[in-house]
Image (tube, rainbow, N blue to C red):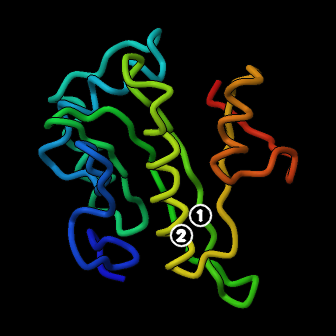
Amino acid sequence: MRPGAWYPPVSGPILATMHDIIIRPATDGDLHGMLELYRHLNPDDPPVGPAAAAAPWSSLLRSGLTTVLVAEENGRLVSSCTLVMVPNLTRGGMSYALVENVVTHAGHRRRGLGHRVLAAALDAAWAANCYKVMLATGSTQEATLRFYETAGFERGGKTFFQARRP
């Protein structure tokens, strides 16, 4: 896999459409829209300016392992998730995937947009022959947990641990 490649390769930049919604991999030009959208993910986080975000955004898009999937409506990013596909030497050499930073703009929720970007992430992972896709959430709200279940994820399949920087 070459750095910056969409993994797996797709035939075009648009993965799915639904009315005026386009589901596609993010591009360099999406940085400003992503910074706005991420304000709906963790509103209490200090904002990251475009200058500080440019290098990490570029690395994210070009790593060859990550893809940021976005739902765009009338030129505005309204939902997104990040898919990380990790090469692996167990499970017969099948990769595994992680989904992180799932967010939908507060004014666009309950329209199926989050399910659409998650479906695109799962489709990409299955097409790349990943044997599993993992997703963790810090939410304990039952509605959020049901959202992930209806998107195809199993609750309680693994025990999750984390270490955070002190």
Q: Earlier in the sequence, mark 2 or mark 1?
A: 1
Q: Amino acid at mark 1?
A: Ala
Q: Amino acid at mark 2?
A: Ala
Q: Position of residue 145 (x, y in %)?
A: 73, 32
- Packing grade of label 2 (10 A; few <14, some 14-19, many >=20) is many
> Residues under labels 2 and 1: Cα distance?
7 Å
Foreground of the two, 68 or 164: 68
User: Vertically, is 44 above or below 5?
Assistant: above
User: Is the N terminus in the top left, top right, bottom left or bottom right quadrant?
Assistant: bottom left
Mark in front: 2 vs 1: 2
Q: Position of residue 7 (x, y in %)?
A: 39, 74
Whether pointer 2 and pointer 1 mark residues with C-beta atoms closer than 8 Å, the reply is yes
User: Vertically, is 162 above or below 62?
Assistant: above
Residue in the image at 62% along x and 30% along y: 165
Residue in the image at 51% along x and 50% along y: 118
Q: Is residue 148 left or right of residue 78?
A: right
Q: Position of residue 108 (x, y in %)?
A: 38, 24
Q: Is residue 148 left or right of residue 29?
A: right
User: Vertically, is 166 above or below 157?
Assistant: above
Q: Which residue is most to the front?
A: 19
- Packing grade of label 1 (10 A; few <14, some 14-19, many >=20) is many
Foreground of the two, 41 or 90: 41
Residue in the image at 81% along x and 44% along y: 160
Q: Determine which residue is flagged by label 2.
A: 125
User: Is the C terminus in the top left, top right, bottom left or bottom right quadrant?
Assistant: top right
Label 1 element class: strand
Foreground of the two, 65 or 157: 157
Label 2 element class: helix
Tell me, for residue 97, which label it has, or none: 1
Foreground of the two, 147 or 124: 147
Residue in the image at 17% along x and 31% along y: 32
Tell me, for residue 52, which label it has, or none: none
